[in-house]
Amino acid sequence: RPADFILIPNAALYDKIAMSDKEEKLLAALRIIEPQVRKINYLESDFGSKNRAPFVVLGSKSERVRLTSMGDGINRILTIILSLLNCPAGGVLAIDEIDNGLHYSVQKQLWEMVFSLAKELDVQVFATTHSMDCLRSFAQVNDSGDGLLIRLDARQNGDIVPQYYSDSEDIRFAVESQIELR
């Protein structure tokens, strides 16, 4: 049976983890970008609107700040971590272009969070990237050997052949040698 593909709005995903231990994991992930994030909630974006948007409270302030005003990176992390936190045990999460909107300086922390949560929640994560910085961060975090890097080679006859890098040393060598892994 083919895998089910479900696209659920972030507000609904947040509702499923609100006021649980998973909410603190989401806050920890958002702090990768903005260490001052103290609270998060989805609220009506405009008075009387049924559309809900994420708002955060920063530091000791009580003022709500709309998360979308804080840049693409923090919103990207929100979507990735909400999706991961809502995967059922034994489930699979596919993330296209995991590094999209993220500065290279935070990618290692995101990979650490993804590795940790995937292991804790028993979720298998498949992520694509075209970024050597993202692959370098992946290699740095993959010391445990839990991650697998798969490169797809296109052959002249049109076949697509996967090349597997499972050993963390092989992955690190491939990245440092800038072998075309995309």
Image: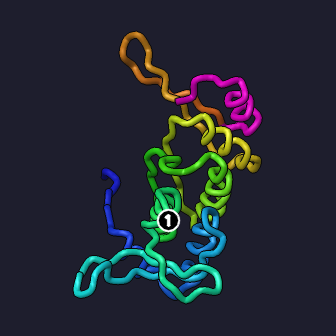
Image position of 23 (left or right of 53): right
The residue that appears at 59% across and 32% down in the rendered structure is: 164
Image position of 11 (left or right of 72): left
* 155 shown above or below 175: above
Give the x, y percent position of residue 50.
24, 81
The residue that appears at 71% across and 23% down in the rendered structure is: 177
Q: Which residues are magenta?
A: 166-182
The residue that appears at 52% across and 57% down in the rendered structure is: 73
The answer to whether residue 135 is seen in the rendering is: yes
* 73 shown above or below 10: above
Mark 1: few/some/many CA within 10 Å (<14, 14-19, 20+): few
Q: Nearer the viewer, residue 85 or 29?
A: 29
Residue 61 figure quarter:
bottom right
Does the stretch in magenta take in 136?
no
The residue that appears at 52% across and 62% down in the rendered structure is: 74
Q: Amino acid at mark 1?
A: Met
Q: How is the image coloured?
A: rainbow
Give the x, y percent position of residue 46.
28, 81
* 89 shown above or below 160: below
Image position of 57 (left or right of 158): right
| Residue bearing mark 1 | 70
The answer to whether residue 87 is seen in the rendering is: no
Does the stretch in magenta take in 171?
yes
Under circle 1, the secondary element is helix
Give the x, y percent position of residue 44.
32, 83
Give the x, y percent position of residue 132.
60, 34
Q: Nearer the viewer, residue 139 or 49?
A: 49
Circle count? 1
